[in-house]
Image (cartoon, rainbow, N blue to C red):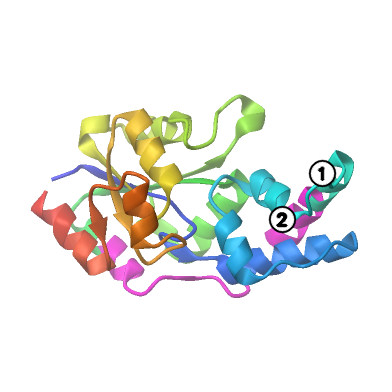
Amino acid sequence: MYRCIIFDLDGTLLNTLCDLAAAVNHSLLLHSLPARTQDEVQRFIGNGVAKLIERAVPAGTPKDITAAVLSDFKIYYAEHCEDMTSPYPDILPLLSELKEHGILTGIVSNKFDAAVKALSAHYFHDLIDVAVGEREAEGIRKKPAPDTLWMAMKELGVSPTETLYVGDADTDILTANAAGVDCVSVTWGFRDRDFLVAHGASVLVDTPRTLLSLILKG
């Protein structure tokens, strides 16, 4: 059995799509840029908020405008990241069961670090032991580089062979591979089964209960 399970956040533990889309469109409209559909925002998610905004603004948008949109996004999202967000069904029982079995838990996300920590504390309390977000300003590379996953493992005192990483995107598969960690891909998030298989997923689960069974069988 694994000693530690580390999760991606958006699309894995939390359904954050509505709040992300609202923040994207609020920020775009402040600069008289066209809004994006929720489906478009869903496709843009996965490589951090800077890349999300880069994809959301129209092609050819000047860099200073893109930077301003990103700044406005961060301000708005920090205030509204809990408006419509919620854990996916059966996520809280999954985390509780892991805690009961003495399994350490963490979050590693490309969302900016302050938001990751705030969302983890608000929704999961003591069910998550460590939460790490994007910290590139400190020279720590974001996913798919292994840096933040290694950071979480170091804080938890576990090795790659003792750790399982769980995510919903191709970025998570690449991150786990780079860190030397086993990976499980979930199909309830922002990428579907066909996409995940096409991008190298080897173990997939359709529900948190199935994930729990897989973990406890070890």
Q: Using residue 148 as the reference point, say whether residue 205 is left or right of it.
A: left
Taking the magenta stretch, the answer to whether it contains residue 74 is: yes
Q: Position of residue 71 (x, y in %)?
A: 80, 49
Res. 36 mark: none
Local SS, label 2: helix
The residue stretch that appears in magenta: 70-96
Q: Position of residue 116 (x, y in %)?
A: 55, 51
Find residue 175 and report its image quarter.
Answer: top left
Find residue 41 and report its image quarter.
Answer: bottom right
Q: Using residue 54 as the reference point, say whether residue 129 is left or right of it.
A: left
Q: CA distance from mark 2 to mark 1?
A: 12 Å
Q: Residue furthest left?
A: 217
Which residue occupies 9% across, 54% down? 217
> What residue does disc 1 label?
67
- Kindly identify the amino acid type of the residue bearing the numbered disc 2: Ala
Q: If the image is split into quadrants, where does the N terminus sit?
A: top left
Q: Is residue 61 visible in the rendered structure shown here?
A: yes
Res. 56 mark: 2
| Pointer 2 or 1: first along the chain | 2
Q: Which of the two marks, 2 or 1, is nearer to us in this view?
A: 2
Q: Is residue 151 above or below residue 110?
A: above
